Image (cartoon, rainbow, N blue to C red):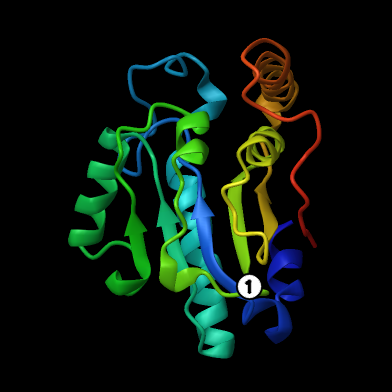
C-alpha cells in the first residue's frame, strides 16, 4: 500500500535514503510494451513507467515534507535509457536533473544491472540507505542476485519499496520469478541461496 509507505517515511528514514535504484520493467516510459518476451503478457504493460513514476513520487514526497532530495538512479537496457533521457529533456520527470542518474552500459537483464552496478562515489554515505524499487516478485530475485555479487558497500543498507503486481498477473508473475530464481541459483550459479539483508516497512 503506497499510502502506508509514505506515512512510514519518517525524517529518520528519509534522511538516510541516498538514492532510489529503480529497476527497469517491461516496456519503456513512453511505450506500454515493446516487441520482446513480454509483448503478449498483457498484465506487464506499462510496468517500466509505473516503476519510474513510483520513484518520482517517493522523491517528491520526501522533498516536499523534509526538503531532502534523494537521487533517482535507473539502469535499464539502452533503448529504455534513451527513452528516459528524452523524457527528462522534455521536462516530464519532476526531479531536478542533477539528481537523476541514468546509467547506460549495454545492460541486457537484471543480472547485468546488478553485476555491473557501481555506486556513485558521492552517494556512498556510511549508515545510508539505497531504496530498491520494482514489482514485489522481481525484488525477491534482485535480493538473491545482490547477495551473490555484493555490489552494495558494507556500511550501507537496502530498503525495499515494492510495487503490487496487477491482480490478473499475480500468480503467473510469482511462478515466472520463482522459476527464474531457481535457474539463477542452481543452474547458472548467478544468485545466492539466501537473500541480501534488507529493510522494509
Q: Position of residue 157 (x, y in %)?
A: 69, 62
Give whichever of 5, 120 is nearer the camera.
120
Label 1: which secondary element: loop
Work out whether 74 lies above or below 5: above
Q: Quadrant of residue 83?
A: top left
Q: To which residue does mark 1 refer?
A: 128
Q: Taking the image as drawn, is residue 47 in sight? A: no
* In the displayed structure image, the side of residue 126 where residue 38 appears, left or right: left
Q: Position of residue 105 (x, y in %)?
A: 30, 39
Work out whether 143 lies above or below 198: above
Q: Position of residue 198 (x, y in %)?
A: 76, 54
> Which residue is painted at 39% across and 45% down in the image?
75
Q: Taking the image as drawn, is residue 51 in sight? A: yes
Q: Position of residue 1 (x, y in %)?
A: 74, 56
Give the position of the C terminus as an image quadrant.
Answer: bottom right
> Which residue is painted at 71% across and 35% down in the image?
144
> Which residue is painted at 74% across and 20% down in the image?
178
* In the displayed structure image, the side of residue 146 where residue 106 appears, left or right: left
> Which residue is painted at 73% across and 24% down in the image?
174
* In the displayed structure image, the side of residue 33 where residue 154 appears, left or right: right
Amino acid at each position: 500500500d503506497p499510502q502506508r509507505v509514505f506515512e512510514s517515511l519518517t525524517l529518520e528514514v528519509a534522511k538516510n535514503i541516498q538514492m532510489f535504484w529503480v529497476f527497469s520493467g517491461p516496456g519503456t516510459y513512453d511505450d506500454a510494451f515493446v516487441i520482446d518476451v513480454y509483448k503478449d503478457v498483457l498484465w506487464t504493460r506499462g510496468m517500466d513507467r509505473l516503476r519510474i513514476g513510483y520513484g518520482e513520487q517517493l522523491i517528491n514526497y520526501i522533498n516536499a515534507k523534509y526538503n531532502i532530495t534523494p537521487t533517482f538512479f535507473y539502469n535499464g537496457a539502452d533503448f529504455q535509457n534513451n527513452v528516459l533521457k528524452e523524457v527528462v529533456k522534455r521536462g516530464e520527470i519532476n526531479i531536478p536533473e542533477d539528481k537523476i542518474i541514468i546509467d547506460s552500459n549495454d545492460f541486457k537483464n537484471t543480472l547485468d544491472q546488478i553485476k555491473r552496478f557501481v555506486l556513485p562515489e558521492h552517494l556512498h554515505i556510511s549508515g545510508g540507505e539505497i531504496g530498491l524499487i520494482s514489482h514485489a516478485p522481481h525484488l525477491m530475485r534482485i535480493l538473491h542476485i545482490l547477495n551473490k555479487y555484493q555490489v552494495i558497500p558494507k556500511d550501507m543498507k537496502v530498503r525495499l519499496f515494492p510495487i503490487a503486481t496487477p491482480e490478473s498477473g499475480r500468480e503467473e508473475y510469482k511462478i515466472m520469478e520463482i522459476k527464474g530464481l531457481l535457474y539463477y541459483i542452481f543452474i547458472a550459479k548467478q544468485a545466492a541461496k539466501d537473500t541480501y539483508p534488507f529493510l522494509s516497512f
